[in-house]
Amino acid sequence: MTESKKVEEVLSDEFTEEVVVSERVVTETNKSEASTPPRYETTTEHTLVVGKYNHVDAGSDVDVHDKNLSGGVAKVEAAQAVWGKRGYILMLGGIWLSMYVYSLDGSTTFNYLQYATSSYSQHSMLGTISTAGAIIISVGNPFMAKLADYIGRGETICLTVIFYLVGYILYASSQDINQYAAGNIIYSLGYTGLSMVNTIVLYDSTTLRYRAFAAGMINIPWIINAFAGSLIAGRILEGAGWRWGYGMFAILVPACLAPIVGALMWGQWKARKKGILQILPDPEKDFVKNPLKSAKRFFKEVDIPGLILVAAALALILLPLQLAPRYPGGWQNPSYIAMLVVGCVLVPVFCVWELWLAERFGFLPIAPLRFFKNGNIAAAILVNFFGFVSFYLQFMFQYSFIMVAKDWTYTELGYFGNIQTVALCLFGLISGIILIWWKRPKWLMVIGLLIRLLGTGLMIRARGALGGTAELVWCQLLQGWGGGFAATISGVIASAMVPHTDMAVVVALVNLCAEIGNGIGTAIATAVWNAQMPGELAAHVPTTNGTLLTELFNSATLIASYPIDDPIRQGAMIAYGNVMRKLCIGATVVAVVPPIVAWFMFTDIELDNTQNKFDNRDLTGKVVEDAKVVEFSANKGGAETKNGEEKV
C-alpha cells in the first residue's frame, strides 16, 4: 500500500476524532473536489499524522514525534513551513510589538497600585491583592500553555485579549477595593496568558543556539519603557489619574496584538491552502453537538483537577498569612488555622495526583513525573522558585519604602522602580549574545546567580540603614545583572530537555513554580509587614493619636505628603527601614539556594541548531541529520553517552 493511500484512508475514517496532516513536499491534485478531502501525491518520506486513530494500521513509517504531536504544535510547525522570510519577520515583529505593550503595561500600571489602594484607604491590602494576582498568574501559566496546545497559539492569544479588556474595564470603573480586586483577578489571566503564549511562540520559532538571544531581543521594550513608562505614569498620575492609566490599555492591547495573531492565523490558513495542514472536524471537540464529550475531553487534556488543586492549595496557604494579622483575633481565629491546615494537606495531594494518578485516569498532567526525573528540568524549577521567593521578599514593599524614604517625583520613583528591569533585560540579551558562540550555558548561569546573591546581600545595608541613592541603585543593578543571566538561561535549558510537543507544558511548569515562589515571597513579606509595621510606627512616629497611626499604616501616600524633614515622616522612615531590613535579610538567606542548585544539578549541555535536545528535529518538525539526541534518564540528572548520543 502506497503512502498517499494510507493518508487517504486515515482522512476518510469516520471514527477519526482529529487529524492534522503535514507533508514537507506535496503535489495537490483534484482540488475541485469540494465534497471530499483533497488528495495528495507525496514525494517525501516524512508524513506527519496527528489524531486518535490506530497509528500501527496507518503504517510503521509514522514516527513517535508524529503520533504524540498536539494540535497546537502541528499548527505552528505547519505555519513555519510556509511563512517564508517575510512571514517569519512579520511573526517576530508581532511578538516584539505584543511584548512592547506588555512591557508598557508592566512598567506603568504597577505604579498605580499604591495610589488605587490608598484612594480606598486600604494600602495594607496591597500585598493581599498582589498575592491573589500571583495565584491566578501561577495557575494561569499551565492553563494557557494547555490551551495553546489544545486550540492553537493564535486562538489562545485572542482569549487573552478578552481577559485583558474585562480586567481593565473593572480596574478603571471600580468604586471600592472589592471591585478593584475582581479586576485584578481577571486582568491577571490576560497578563499571564500573553506572557506565556509569547514565550511559547518564540521558543517554537527559534533554535536552541539563538533562543536566548531572541528572548533578549523581545525584552528590549522593557528597556525602552523603563524611561517612557515612567514618564507616562508620572504624567497620568499628575493629570488624568490612575483610572485612565488602566483604561487606555483597553485600546492599546487589541491593536498591538493584532499583528501576531494575524501572522499565526495567516500561516495556518496558507498551510491548509497548500495542503501542508489538514484539520478535520472532531466530534469530541464540538461543544455544540456533543457538550458532555467535549467538556470531558477538555477536562482531561487541560488537567482541570490539577489546576484546581494547586490554586486551592496556594489560596488556602498564602491568603491566611496576610489576612490574619489584619483582623481582630489574628491567629486565634480557628478559620485561619483551618484554611492553613487544609492548604498544607492539599500540597501532597496535588503532588500524588500529578506524579502518579493523573495519567492512570487518562489525564494529561501539568507536572508529569518524567519531567522531575531530568536533573536539568528539576534544577530550572528550583532555581526559579527560590529566586522568586527571594526577589519578592524584598520587592513587595520596595516602592512604598522609596516613596517614604526619598523626596522624589513620580517620574523619579518610576525610574528607580525600573532599574532592575532594565538590568534584567540588558544582561539577558548579553547572555544570549554570549551563548551564540559559547554554547555551554551552565557556568554562565552559576556566575549570574552569584552576582544576584551579592546584590541581594548588599541590600541589607542599603535599605535597612536608609542608605544613599548610589547604594540603592547598585543593589538593583547587581540583582538585574545576575537575574537576567539566570532567567534567560534557565528557560532555554528547560525547553531544550523535552520534545516539541511537551515544550509549552515544561516552560509553563517552570513559570508556575516561579510564580508560586512569587506568591510565597509576597505572602511572607506582607505577613511581616502587617505584623510589625504598626508597632514600628507607634514606636518611632511622635504621636499618640491612634487614628493617625492607623491612617499612616494604611496609606504610604499620606506619609509621603508630609515634608521630608517633618518629624512624622522622619519617624515613618525609620519604621519602614527597620521592617525592610528584616525582609532583606530573609531575601539574602533564600538567595543562597539557587547557585548551589545550579552548580550541582545542571548539565553543561551544548546549544545547537535544533528545536530541542530530545530529538533531531528542526523548527518545522523535519529530521535534522547528524544532530545529537538526548533521552531522559530516570536514574540521575546528569548526562551520559549512549551510542554516540547524549543521555540526560
Image: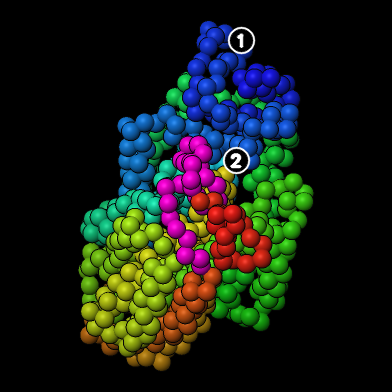
Per the rendered image, the range of residues in magenta is 602-627
Residue in view at x 61 percent, y 80 percent: 330
Residue in view at x 42 percent, y 88 percent: 536
Q: Nearer the viewer, residue 186 or 100?
A: 100
Identify the element where label 2 is drawn. Answer: helix
Q: Look at mark 2 in the image and give the residue it sits on.
A: 65
Identify the element where label 1 is drawn. Answer: loop
Q: Look at mark 1 in the image and give the residue it sits on.
A: 35
Label whose residue precedes the other's in the sequence (2 or 1): 1
Q: Is residue 640 above or below residue 105?
A: below
Q: Nearer the viewer, residue 378 or 298?
A: 378
Confirm or deny contact between disc 2 and disc 1 (CB under 8 A): no
Q: Quadrant of residue 315?
A: bottom right
Q: Position of residue 82 (x, y in %)?
A: 42, 29
For the C terminus, which image quadrant?
Answer: bottom right
Q: Is residue 170 in sight in this rendering?
A: no
**2 vs 1, front mark:** 2
> What is the three-letter code of the residue carrying label 2?
His
Q: Is residue 490 left or right of residue 8?
A: left
For the N terminus, which image quadrant?
Answer: top right
Q: Nearer the viewer, residue 7 or 149?
A: 7
Q: Nearer the viewer, residue 537 or 251?
A: 251
> Dot 1, how many residues are within 10 Å of its Cα: few (below 14), some (14-19), or many (20+)?
few
Q: Position of residue 389 (x, y in %)?
A: 49, 72
Residue in view at x 63 percent, y 60 percent: 633
Residue 613 lies in the magenta-colored region:
yes
